[in-house]
Image (cartoon, rainbow, N blue to C red):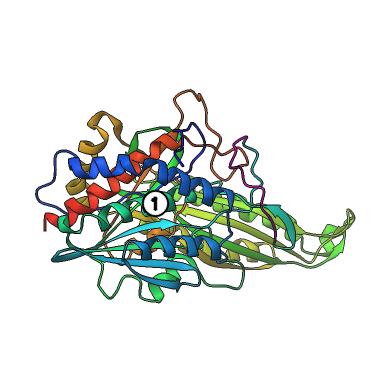
Amino acid sequence: MLIKKLQYPLLFCFGLLATTTTLAQELDPEIAAAAKEIENKVIEWRRDIHQNPELSNREFETAKKIAKHLKSLNIEVTENVAKTGVVGILKGDKPGKTVALRADIDALPVTERTDVPFKSTVKTTFLDTEVGVSHACGHDTHVAILMGVAEILAKHKNKINGTVKFIFQPAEEGPPPGEEGGAKLMIKEGVLKNPDVDAIFGLHINAGTPVNMIKYKPGGTMAAVERFVINVKGTQTHGSAPWSGVDPIMISAKIIDGLQTIISREAPLVDEAAVITVGKITSGVRFNIIPESAEMIGTVRTLDPKMRELIIRRMKEMVPAIAKAYNAEATIEFQNNTSITYNDPDLVKQMLPTIQAVAGKQNVILAKATTGGEDFSYFQEVVPGFYFFLGGKPETLEKAAAHHTPDFYIDESGLLLGVKVMSQLTLDYLNAQ
């Protein structure tokens, strides 16, 4: 069925990377024609996945659809990687390096509010709460784009010098409590081996960037994300006589204040941005009782490895010291959620001409870093990687709803550029070696 090009929502999509010495200055005409030919099919895949979203580590039906498509293209397929992930291997007609292309496949516990015919009405139970499920971050578009790239490259193996590994990754939004998942588990299970990957590309569709534009940044482009938990132990007493106890709530306030001085007085913010946020405080049961303990939960965001090390070290030093100054005890524990999404500067420089040739130089923008996090970063810790943003904001929309919200919306006409760019990056990277 032919699908009319739409002005409907998509999400962040991921692009590709390459190291080259000489790069194509324009899109291969055959690749451009092939991309245009399957545009309606890519949109149809996206809508189907959008209407049938699945949460992290539960992407069973999504994985089946991906695997079925790859097998139909005679691509070597491995299923159940990192629980529900799918990996496809396509060998070109000539030997060469191996490039990996990654798309995340999971949805979010967000009830969709957009008025589109393929709106998600799926509901489930998440952390003991009944919630709607939707692709409120655009992973459905990432899947559709990469399925399209797989079809194009499989039909043009004669143009490939080397091997392409298609990585459809589950649980980018984080696995359920008590489970492993995401990029970390895929790497642990050897997704970057056999054959060894030389470079990896990813793209994320961006609801706030005008459609058919691309944003990129060499170096740190998205933040490392740490979750921390602080426990303060005081001495319980009557609220009317605070001198007879040790108040963990007051001490928590002092700790929060102290932590912000790390950002304002110790972190070299001229190098990169950094954030410390306490998002939750739990303490006490009654208005006239000073409780025995308090718990704080928060996040640290950093874009520079040295600054990350400094901030975490100082937090570990400061928290127990402040508590001790007020005759209390405090501990702090960290959990790493993502590393810094670090675009290899040399690879960015080498592949930028391809992106500019495909999208038009005027449509490729050097962007600032964002303090959001992305577990694509774990792949980049192992092999050079390039991660960029694909525009998805309709021209008629003045302001787009944020990602991870019920009104998240994207213009599907931007998918075609995603397919073209990822296909051409792959060919240029492999054929320039």
Q: How many marks?
A: 1
Three-letter code for the amino acid on which mark 1 is drawn: Leu
Residue at 58 percent across and 58 percent down: it is 54
Q: Where is residue 291 in the image (x, y as percent from the top left)?
A: 81, 63
SS at circle 1: loop
Tell me if residue 39 can be seen: yes
x 61%, y 42%: residue:
119
In this picture, residue 39 sits left or right of residue 240? left
Q: What stretch is highlighted in magenta?
A: 115-125
Query: Which quadrant holds residue 282?
Result: bottom right
Q: Nearer the viewer, residue 359 or 230?
A: 359
Give the residue pinned by disc 1.
Answer: 303
Q: Residue furthest front?
A: 1
Magenta span has 116? Answer: yes
User: In the drawing, does residue 325 fall left or right of residue 15?
Assistant: right
Q: x, y (%) of residue 213?
A: 34, 34
Dividing the picture into quarters, in which one does residue 188 lie? bottom left
Q: Position of residue 358 (x, y in %)?
A: 24, 38
